[in-house]
Structure formats: structure tokens, C-alpha cells
Amino acid sequence: MNMDIEARVKKVITSCIAVDVDSINGQTHLVEDLYADSLDLIDIIFGLSEEFDISCNENDLPDMTTFADICRVVKKSLESRV
């Protein structure tokens, strides 16, 4: 997985949820591990849209439960723009 994408996704997550960037890894679950609530998840979606200039919305949430899932969705969205 692209390290730049991972770093940028971590930046978005930590700007929306008060967590240490070092506590986030591939299997980190947003709700169970980071205690994100529904508003946090919406903030993350909007943050990703702005950070990567991609189209993300609430419909993407079921595919984005872990950090690795989010990176995968972002990468797929970036590849589909080309």
C-alpha cells in the first residue's frame, strides 16, 4: 500500500478523532478501537474527500471499518479518476 496514502489517511483520522497517529495500524477498527461515533465517521469521509480530491460519501462507510479498508477505498477512488 502506498505509504503516502497511509500517512495522509492517518492525518485525516487524527484531525477528526483525538488519537495518537502511532496507535493506528492496518487492522485498527475505527469504532471498536478508536471509539469513533457516527459524526466522527462523517467528518472522516469529508476529510478524505478534501485531502484526496475524491468523491466519498456515507454510502462508502460499510466498506471503511478499518484503517486498511479506508486506504483501499481511497486508492481505488484515486485509480478510478485516471
Image (spheres, rainbow, N blue to C red):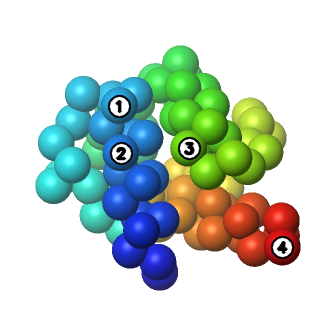
Residue 51 badge: 3
C-alpha separation, residue under disc 1 versus residue under disc 2? 6 Å
Which residue sits at x=66%, y=62%?
73
- Name the amino acid, label 4: Val
Q: Is residue 39 left or right of residue 8?
A: right
What label does residue 15 carry, if any?
Answer: 1
Q: Which residue is mark 4?
A: 82
Distance between the Cα atoms at labels 4 and 1? 28 Å
- The answer to which image quadrant residue 3 occupies is bottom left
Instruction: Residue under label 2, please give it.
Output: 11
Circles 4 and 1, Cβ within 8 Å, touching? The answer is no
- Quarter containing the C terminus: bottom right
Q: Are marks 3 and 2 in contact (CB under 8 Å)?
A: yes
- State the CA–CA distance, disc 3 to disc 2: 9 Å
- Check disc 3 and give the amino acid type: Glu
Residue visible at 61% across and 51% down in the picture: 52
